[in-house]
Amino acid sequence: MKHKKSPPELTKDSLLTVFKKEKRPLALGELARILGLTSRQKQSLKRFVRSLAKEGAIVSLKNHRYGLSEEMSLVTGTLWCTRSGNGFIIPEKKGERDLFVPARSMKNAFHGDKVVARVEHTFRGRREAKIIKVTQRKMGNIVGFVKKDRNLAYVIPEDDRISGHFVVNRRTNIGNLHDDDLVAARITRFPDEGNDPECKILSVFPGLSDVKSIIRFVEYKHGLPLRFKKVVEAEARGMDLAADPAERLDLRDTKHVTIDGELAKDFDDAVCVEKTDRGFILYVSIADVSHYVAPRSNLDSEAYARGTSVYFPGTVIPMLPKRLSNGLCSLNPREDRLTLTVKLVFDRNGRPAGASFHRSIIRSTMRLTYNGVEDALIKRGRKPARKVMELLRELELMGELASLLGQEREKRGSLDFDLPEPEVLLDIEGGITNILRAERLFSHRIIEEFMIAANEAVARFLSDKGASPLFRIHEPPDVDKLRDFKRLLQTLSIGYAKGPPDPRNLQSILAGVEGTPYEFLINKVLLRSMKQAKYSAINKGHFGLASDCYLHFTSPIRRYPDLLCHRILKGILTNSPVRQTQEELEKMATHLSEQERMAMEVEREIEDRTRVLFMKEKVGEEYEGIISHVASFGFFVELLEVFVEGLVLLSDLLDDYYHFEEEKFRIIGRRTRKIYRIGDRVRVRVALADVEKSRLHFALLGKLAE
């Protein structure tokens, strides 16, 4: 008896294979017939096709047909706009270079939208494209300034990258709105042929007069989730510690400690170091968040949607409800907590000699701070707390091992830019008292080394087991950007080895300029030459860490990729492997990388506006600073006394006509030949501090001698 051939599994890949094989646009009926789908599968076909069209892999044509984007000179990707009105498309397809989109070819797309564009032509190696379709809108909210015209009100976006205006919904009572009011609004209609975009006013800001109002403003602007849904909170409240310690490695008698900042409330990692005859044993124990957050639960869906916690001065938008992040999953001192432990063995020189992985239970001995540990180990002139000194021997072992691990990383070429981060100091009422360069302590380096070691060990273990985690990759710098960096080195008579980018060569350059007048310049320019690290379903190594296999494992309370990694590791340890398709992993990698970039953008914007707010009362005051960045419109100056950066406009330099020499990272006067470049010390006066428009301008008073 002849068996009827079973229909193929319906996947996005199988659909794309049909399109490629047929070499022509296809209608839904043709696709179903070619694939031999069942009636039930035909119901799913439309959903798969729409999903592919939304992603931009195929495009909707006339007569209800669909065609492959790549066969019609079409490119799909994310639009990034500039303040000039032009933009760039970052293609979805891996390995493709960005496309330039002139302002006239934007159609009705906005910054951050997913778009389909046609490649029009190539000029001097740069591909230029025209947007033909928006497949997914990024923005839900806008913030901006009100402009009134008779019976209409408009919102002009505060973000210069968003062109045009939004008409305030006619059902809104605009009588209470005034010109230049700062508002938050929800977009109710995007622009289409003959219709302006519309919006509904959500909130009117009386002014950005404190950090709280800045945070609220930015939360509205980016549409951040301010609260957890009731079902998510209810799920979290229903959790308890319940677990059988007999099923776990009991490490409650080891001297695990947490080391975090003074204000930290979620402790997701604890460490312990023991000395052996042959070297060291390092325990890195991480909160077992996956024990509480089950796949496809309400908690899981919300955590995935958020992707990461977002940190602001004095507060946080957490990835998980406080019941978990500050409670059950936080490794609080003297409380039993469920963990996943990486046990690493090192020889006397800090070289790896073994690794094992365990479901565990710990009881943290003490909650330590970076400053407290630093006082105990470095003797900074401050008397360490007595409780810290009780663990002095253990802390000294940690410092010894961390130093060895750092030396081993340095040998392989791991890069360390050591550029400062801002630390905003607030008083009890939330007012800004100062903005400092956060000091990078030896105690910070201890935890960094231990977390890197654990992340690498888990990455290698999962890779060797054939598992499919999300890797943390950092690709080598673009050839073009590195070429500019090499040109700069030539102008400074600094040598650079020929050949492809190698972290060891770059590391030697950083070491060679340490302590010289060029240190700031070289660090800044090299950092700008680097690509951004991201998540990937495919392991491509981590250039900056000089690591051939790396992932994120150590922060599952605040990063979803770490939570996913925990599930995969536990699946192997319990012989119940987690299975995900390559397609699912790639989708996760894209989403979680985007959420990370969003969080970074939000945090940076709040930092910038907070700096402007701090300087508002200092207009007219004079400061010394260092030129930190040079552009065609001016240069940025980083102040020395407070960690604040402002702009000196070229149009404000009246002693000469200055032009920008991009390849030399400097501006030069046509008549005087006066030069300003990254790293130069200058004196400036605070000229403008506009918090609403996030603008801090300096007036140049003069260049200082080296």
Image: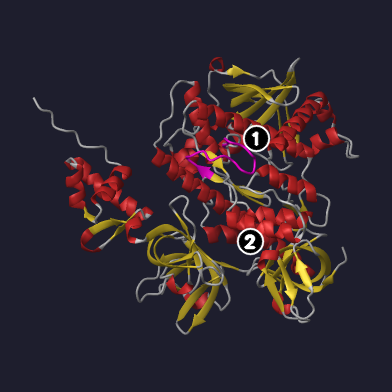
Residue 67 is covered by the magenta coloring:
no
Whole-percent x, y for residue 658 in the image: 72, 77
Residue 452 — which label? Answer: 1
Tag in front: 2 or 1: 1
Mark count: 2
Percent position of residue 226, x then y: 54, 52
**Which of the 4 image quadrants contains residue 273?**
top right
- Indicate the quadrant containing the C terminus: top left, top right, bottom left or bottom right: bottom right
- In the rendered view of the protein, which quadrant contains the N terminus? top left
**Label 2: few (<14), some or many (≥20) within 10 Å?**
some
Q: Where residue 246 sits: x, y (%)?
A: 55, 14
Q: Where is residue 602? Give x, y as percent.
A: 59, 56
Indicate the quadrant where residue 106 lies.
bottom left
Give the extent of the magenta segment: 535-551
**Residue 547 part of the magenta-drawn span:** yes
Q: Which residue is mark 2?
A: 213
> Camera-side residue: 208 or 696?
696
Residues at marks 2 and 1, CA–CA distance in whole angstroms: 37 Å
Which residue is outermost to the bottom? 150
What residue is shown at x 65% (from left), y 19% (from top)? 251
Camera-side residue of 566 and 515: 515
